[in-house]
Image: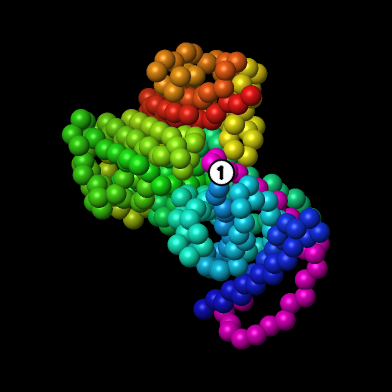
Amino acid sequence: MSTTYVGAWTRRDDAGRPVSFRAAFEQPGRLGGFTARTEQKQFAEVDVRTGVPVSGRRAQVLASAHMPDGDFIDSFADVRGPLPLNTTEYILDNGVKWSVRAWQVSGDSDAPVFESFLMRMPRTWQDGHTYREQFNVGVFGPTLRGQGDAGPEQGYPGVIRYGNTIRAYVPVVGDGAGHWGESLFTSVTSSLEADGKQIPDKYGVSPSVGTTEYTVPAEDAEYRLSVDNSRDPAVYAVSTRVRAQWTFRSSSVPKDKATELPLSVIRFSPELSPDSTAKAGRRLDVPFRIEGASAGRQPAKVAFEVSYDEGATWQSAEAVGGTHLSLRHPAEPGSVSLRAELTDDSGNTLVQTIERAYLTTR
């Protein structure tokens, strides 16, 4: 038996910004009350900023404590306001993990429409430190589990295999800060092939919008997993179409232990304004980071292309120092689309395309 107590207290600071203090206490092996006295120096300060890719939206932001088994404790103590929204979360540092989530919402309060969801994976927060968490700012793209993160076993991003079952969840609209996310889409397509033969998914759900499973052959085969999602520019003006295709080899593994499959993604994180725009006619550095199975490893090949006409034509973009692209935007306002191709040292590949990755303005 284990008991976790959670409390939240919210007020407004002198500038009118919402400020929340959040505390959780684990009481293993017992029930019943207890007393705890805390001071502000025991809390970490988390500066949460939520961007607004289109006007007229509002946000809901919530920090949630997680129990020892990883499940989060739901709470109605969220913070709400028009986008862009800045709020400060003070989180008690006592070994309990907390995640932070943000929603983009439209419609009136009686009939809200939740247009997107983004989540910072659970972690501990160190007292005396200040953290910045920026949500809902591009570039939005595919997300896989990070080192030490929970995976599709718990409903989080990742692709694993146990026995002759592949379980996959590869959301395609994580933000530039690395939060994984979901969104309303106008079209969703996906497929998994083994040596060219299509494998049906068990639940009739694309792995880009939810966790699904595939029953696959025991023998070694080359797999091709593809996802292609589009969304309405009136809801999200950026990352309006995201495509990704992975190839990898796999064969049967033990049933009682999940084996992570060798899929990777590339996350782009330029400094953009809260509406995911940059200045036209100027140069912008676009940092990139390899995540997933190839994180921290030197790939056999990685190449980039950029398009300034929404994917009609593409041109090569050189990686500078293996850390970023240096792009010169056209003088006229428009959009910037990004494509990346990666081959790891075992021959597994990724082709990732993000149309309207961000916009340019005067």
Front residue of this view, candidates 233 and 154: 233
Q: Residues within 10 Å of mark 1 (few under 14, many from 20)?
A: some
Residue extending farthest to the bottom is 32
Report how many numbered discs are placed on residues in the image.
1
Any part of residue 264 in sight: no
In this picture, residue 193 sits left or right of residue 273: left
> Residue 32: where, in percent of width, then height?
61, 86
Is residue 78 on the magenta stretch? Answer: no
Residue extending farthest to the left is 197
Say above or below: 24 vs 134.
below
Q: At 58% across and 26% down in the image, what residue appears?
A: 360
> Residue 117: where, in percent of width, then height?
49, 51
Q: At 27% across and 38% down in the image, what residue appears?
A: 191
Is residue 50 on the magenta stretch? Answer: yes
In the rendered image, which quarter is residue 154 located in? Answer: bottom left
In this picture, residue 234 sits left or right of residue 192: right
Any part of residue 115 in sight: yes
Q: Which residue is mark 1?
A: 55
Front residue of this view, candidates 27 and 225: 225
Say above or below: 348 vs 105.
above
User: What residue range appears in magenta?
Assistant: 27-54
In the rendered image, which quarter is residue 319 located in? Answer: top right
In the rendered image, which quarter is residue 43 located in? Answer: bottom right
Say above or below: 201 vs 74.
above
Please state which amino acid type lies under the numbered disc 1: Ser
- Give the image's coloring scheme: rainbow
Say above or below: 140 vs 33.
above
Q: At 70% across and 63% down in the image, what residue appears?
A: 20
Q: At 36% across and 38% down in the image, what residue appears?
A: 229
